[in-house]
Image: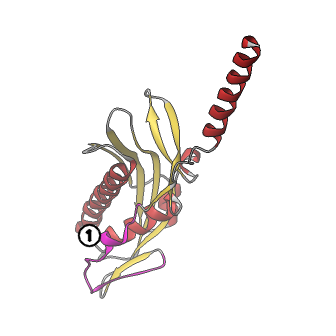
Amino acid sequence: MKKFFNITFSLITVTLLLFSCAQAPTPKVSYYLLNAPEHNLAGDNEQTVVGGEHKVAGDHKIILDNVILPQYLKQSSIVMLMNENQLHYARYHLWGESLQQGITKLIKQALTITNKQQSLHLTIEIDHFYPTDQTNVILSGRYWLSMTEAEVKNNQYVFNFAFKQALKADGYGQAVKQMHVLIKQLAAQINQHVVAFNSN
């Protein structure tokens, strides 16, 4: 009888444990915008962005033709680099819009220099863009500035970029804020090269 009681008690305990595990709340899913609204409130009223074009009255436009991402960034999960070469996809931390859309919008808003000669084409190709388990955020790749699309195809006027910034705090929210900062740094570098085009 005692043995039967022990077995019954064990079965009840296991059942209760399984039931409590099944009732555990699912973690809350968080969504993030690289191009957050509060970052876009301040701006020059004389500047206008239409489609892929950035223009100031009287100047020639900069046309953002394309933002090219590697396959691993073309999904909704925020990616983190682990152990130098392992990619971790956050299950409950997702982009609210595609990363390509977020980067495109942010670059368009951050382009402040216009070209004096004629319309200038811009193509951006990103190789790495993520936080790491070493408490850094990394952005690297290349971009092309050209008067014509043929110059892009001929690999003319290509500029490499590589930015790295230490995370100021833990959490995906902080990582996204600093990813935003790195895209703004990329836009600042592009602005400098547009100035160089204007001086030629």
Return the x and y of residue 187 as percentages of the image width and height. Answer: 32, 61
- When asked about the image quadrant of residue 107, the answer is bottom left
Local packing at callout 1 (Cα closer than 10 Å; few below 14, some 14-19, many 20+) is: some
Determine if residue 156 is in view. yes
Q: How is the image coloured?
A: secondary structure
Residue type indicated by callout 1: Asn
Question: Is residue 161 inside the magenta stretch?
Answer: no
Q: Does the magenta run of residues contain 37? A: yes
Residue at 28% in and 56% down: 185
Q: For the magenta stretch, what is the residue range?
A: 34-51
Q: Residue at x 41, y 54 (%)?
A: 143
Instruction: Inspect this view and state whether residue 60 appears.
Output: no
Looking at the figure, which quarter contains the C terminus?
bottom left
Q: Position of residue 151 (x, y in %)?
A: 47, 60
Left or right: 44 in relation to 77: left
Percent position (x, y) of residue 165?
Answer: 27, 44
Residue drawn at (62%, 45%) of the image: 23
**Which residue does the numbered mark 1 point to in the structure image?**
198
Residue 64 percent location from the top left of the image: 45, 68
Vertical placement of 151 versus 26: above or below?
Answer: below
* Left or right side of 125 for 165: left
Does residue 29 lie above or below 5 as drawn?
below
The front one of 126 and 72 is 72
- Which structural element holds mark 1? helix
Q: Is residue 56 positioned above or below 12 on the image?
A: below
Residue 166 vs residue 139, the one in the foreground = 166
